[in-house]
């Protein structure tokens, strides 16, 4: 999720460096394309789902496929989105589903 980029990576493991917050401008630059509506604010992405998340002009949160740019899921509020993400994480832990990044 976009945030303030770290001042220093000193003392962090490679995993900690890779999973650190990324500057919001960098996320915008990675996923912003000609087809992206100007009112979409890209604020996060998912390596697991190969999607990114935007807030539209109506403050809905949309999950967008990185390749097709099609909306996969829509949430009425940022709170609804966060609740869903937390629940998905709890379900993954309960079902012992873990993701490895190489």
Image (cartoon, rainbow, N blue to C red):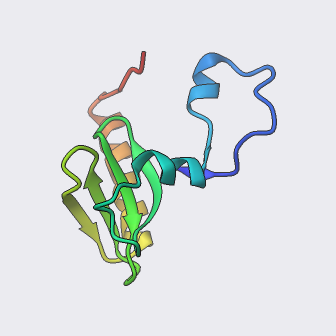
Which residue does the image show at 80% across and 31% down from the upper left?
8
Q: In this view of the protein, which residue sits in the foreground, 45 or 91?
A: 45
Which residue does the image show at 74% across and 39% down from the upper left?
6
Which residue does the image show at 79% across and 19% down from the upper left?
11
How many numbered tags mark residues here?
0
Which residue does the image show at 56% across and 32% down from the upper left?
19
Image quadrant assignment for residue 17 = top right
Above or below 57: residue 9? above
Is residue 33 toward the left or the right of residue 1 in the image?
Answer: left
Quadrant of image for the C terminus: top left
Is residue 54 toward the left or the right of residue 63 in the image?
Answer: right
Q: In this view of the protein, which residue sits in the foreground, 28 or 101?
A: 28
Above or below 81: residue 85? above
Percent from the top left, x then y, of residue 64? Answer: 27, 56
Above or below 54: residue 27? above
Residue furthest out toward the front: 34
Percent from the top left, x then y, of residue 48? Answer: 32, 35
Above or below 8: residue 29? below
Percent from the top left, x then y, of residue 51? Answer: 31, 47
Percent from the top left, x then y, of residue 28? Answer: 49, 54
Image quadrant assignment for residue 78 = bottom left
Q: In this view of the protein, which residue sits in the foreground, 89 or 53?
A: 53
């Amino acid at each position: 999720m976009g945030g303030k980029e770290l001042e220093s990576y000193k003392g962090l493991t490679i995993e900690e460096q890779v999973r650190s917050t990324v500057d919001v401008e960098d996320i915008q630059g990675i996923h912003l394309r000609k087809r992206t509506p100007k009112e979409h604010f890209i604020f996060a992405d998912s390596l697991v789902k190969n999607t990114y998340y935007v807030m539209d002009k109506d403050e809905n949160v949309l999950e967008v496929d990185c390749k097709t740019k099609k909306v996969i899921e829509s949430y009425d509020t940022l709170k609804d989105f966060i609740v869903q993400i937390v629940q998905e994480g709890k379900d993954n832990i309960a079902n012992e589903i873990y993701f490895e990044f190489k």
